[in-house]
């Protein structure tokens, strides 16, 4: 798998280049994308890793 993709949840693999915004929903985070209406979710633990690894 290309390094631009990241598994944020067991049900979601997201393209890091297409993330528009990440919102905190208390126990989880919601990912919005550029020019795409669907949303994906990411756990707190995965979000912490993502934040450190990709400097978001």
Image (cartoon, grey):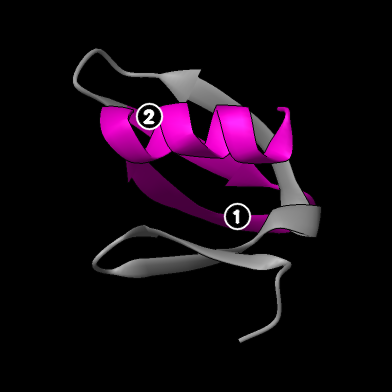
Mark 2 burial class by Cα count in 10 Å: few <14, some 14-19, many 20+: some
Picture coordinates of residue 40, whole percent (x, y): 43, 52
The quarter of the picture where the C terminus appears is top right
Q: Based on the displayed image, in which of its 4 quarters is residue 15 positioned?
A: bottom right
The secondary structure type at the circle numbered 2 is: strand
Position above or below: 25 against 2: above
* Residue hosting label 1: 37
Residue 33 shows up from this direction: yes
* Residue hosting label 2: 29
Q: Which mark is residue 12?
A: none
Along the viewing direction, whichever of 16 and 37 lies nearer the viewer: 16
Picture coordinates of residue 52, whole percent (x, y): 59, 28
The quarter of the picture where the N terminus appears is bottom right
Residue 21 on the magenta segment: no
Residue 48 on the magenta segment: yes
Magenta-drawn segment: 29-56
Residue located 80% across and 56% down the image: 17
Picture coordinates of residue 37, whole percent (x, y): 60, 55
Position above or below: 33 against 7: above
């Amino acid at each position: 798998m290309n390094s631009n993709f990241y598994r944020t949840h067991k049900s979601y693999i997201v393209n890091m280049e297409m993330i528009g915004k990440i919102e905190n929903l208390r126990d989880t985070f919601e990912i919005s994308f550029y020019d795409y209406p669907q949303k994906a979710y990411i756990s707190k633990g995965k979000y912490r890793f993502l934040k450190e690894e990709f400097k978001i």
